[in-house]
Image: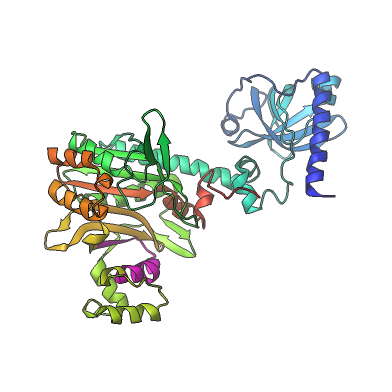
Amino acid sequence: MSDELSVNEYRQQRIENMEKLSEAGYPAFGEAFERTDRLDRLHEQFELEKPVAACGRIVAMRKMGKLAFAHVNDGSARFQLMIQRDVIGEDAFKAFKLLDLGDCIGVQGAFFLTKTEENTIAVKIWKLLSKSLLPLPEKFHGLSDVETRYRQRSLDLISNPEVMDLFKKRSKVMREIRSYLDQRDFLEVETPMLQQLAGGAAAKPFQAHYNALNVDVFMRIAPELYLKRLIVGGMDRVYEMNRNFRNEGIDRTHNPEFTCLEIYQAYGDMRSMQTLIQGLFLHIAETVFEKIEFEWMGHTIQLQTPWKEVSYHDLICEHLGANWFELDEAGMRAIAEEREVGLEDVMSAKEITHEIYDKTIEGTLIQPTFITRLPAELVPLANTCADDPELVDVFELIIGGKEIAPAYSELNNPLEQRKRFEEQAKSDESAIDHDFLTALEIGMPPTGGMGIGIDRFMMLLTGSDAIRDVILFPQLKPRG
């Protein structure tokens, strides 16, 4: 018998049970149910014979002659129910035995302790709140198929308590981030997700058309240029935690729709952001996870501060030789070939260097490491270093071989910014954000800015190997 046929048979059986329940006075889809509290709190409030009302989804059931036991789960915890024919009555007991795993019910009764000392509700009245027409995954194996878990997250949450726990922790992480920043006088703001120019990062955007204005728009790739407008306007500490969209590849650490935290602090710089992120990450680790050591991608990550700092130049020389920057392009290409790094014919020496860094060096940085003083060409929105205009005053935070957060001493010279935009646009005037340049000409104070990939941060904290594990509804290829 095929799996599909088996599911259809189960569904038909449940529909028949639903009809019988309805005839017995238990409509399949009931009204709101007033409960004493969530099940996790009911465990804390347990007191023998205390009256209680509870509700949840049936996740286990044992039906005997005059007695039945069931476990319900409301998303916070499981709780055992005891149903006795002599207590609830013959008709109600017969109807209860028609229930299936997955059905949502509400009960009224009193706390009771079984011989095995399990907290239990001795049921006096029960109501059917919602009939489940499809079976839950088999008890002992659960929902283990990865593709099905991502496509049917509802079943995944019901069947795998560790998945529910992960996403509860994600919610706590985001709440603690907000609390940490709010306590330091940062103001949470919202900026446009539909933008007429896709700026703030180098990435391919998703494009749409806005009918009311008859203009093409883009889903934002970053909120940076709007947040800096707010700094110009006098909001001296701002942050936004929201979605960015990039029309690029999907892999273990990339999803086209992802959550990013961007932070800007007027009268600060890259160093201000270093202090902020070390304090923030340590706070989250200790508050939500009660530890500062994590297993991720086969490595043990230690978040104890201070974190290592190394300049881009020194890191390259450490891995590629002290004379690397004295080599000509032919010499660099030879070393790239030895390391099996593919290069395009038109790459410059700086592009070759960064390609080798990206493919062979970044992944070796396991413990939290700040890479500083990057080539200016790589970061067009950052201030140059005071001692070397060829470099920018930035850091890239690498943990577990993955970039987690970049931060800049932001470029606030409007003339230099215009020049860099023009170089990027390559004579395409429409690609330049003139409104942002106008804001810069009003005057933006020295500012530190930082972006943190929340999804990758969650991967680290939960030891997840794939970004899809920490996103409730990741993007997937359509079936068929």
Along the viewing direction, whichever of 69 and 456 lies nearer the viewer: 456
Colour mode?
rainbow
Q: Kindly tell me whether residue 435 is visible in this rendering.
A: yes
Q: What span is colored magenta in the figure?
A: 352-372
Asked whether 420 falls inside the magenta stretch, the response is no
Residue 24 spot, x, y in % from top left? 83, 19
Along the viewing direction, whichever of 443 and 54 lies nearer the viewer: 443
Q: Please determine whether, in this image, residue 359 is positioned above or below residue 50.
A: below
Image position of 311 (left or right of 258): left
Residue 343 spot, x, y in % from top left? 37, 72
Residue 250 spot, x, y in % from top left? 49, 55
Residue sitting at the far left: 387
Q: Please determine whether, in this image, residue 38 is positioned above or below residue 398.
A: above
Q: Residue at 30% of width from left, 50% of height from top? A: 277
Q: Please determine whether, in this image, residue 240 is positioned above or below residue 202.
A: above
Q: Residue at 27% of width from left, 39% of height from top? A: 227
Image position of 453 (left or right of 426): right
State how many labels appear.
0
Q: Please determine whether, in this image, residue 375 is positioned above or below residue 98.
A: below
Q: Residue at 50% of width from left, 57% of height from top? A: 251
**Quarter where residue 445 is shown:** top left
Along the viewing direction, whichever of 455 and 185 lies nearer the viewer: 455
Residue 153 spot, x, y in % from top left? 60, 43
Q: Kindly tell me whether residue 184 is visible in this rendering.
A: no
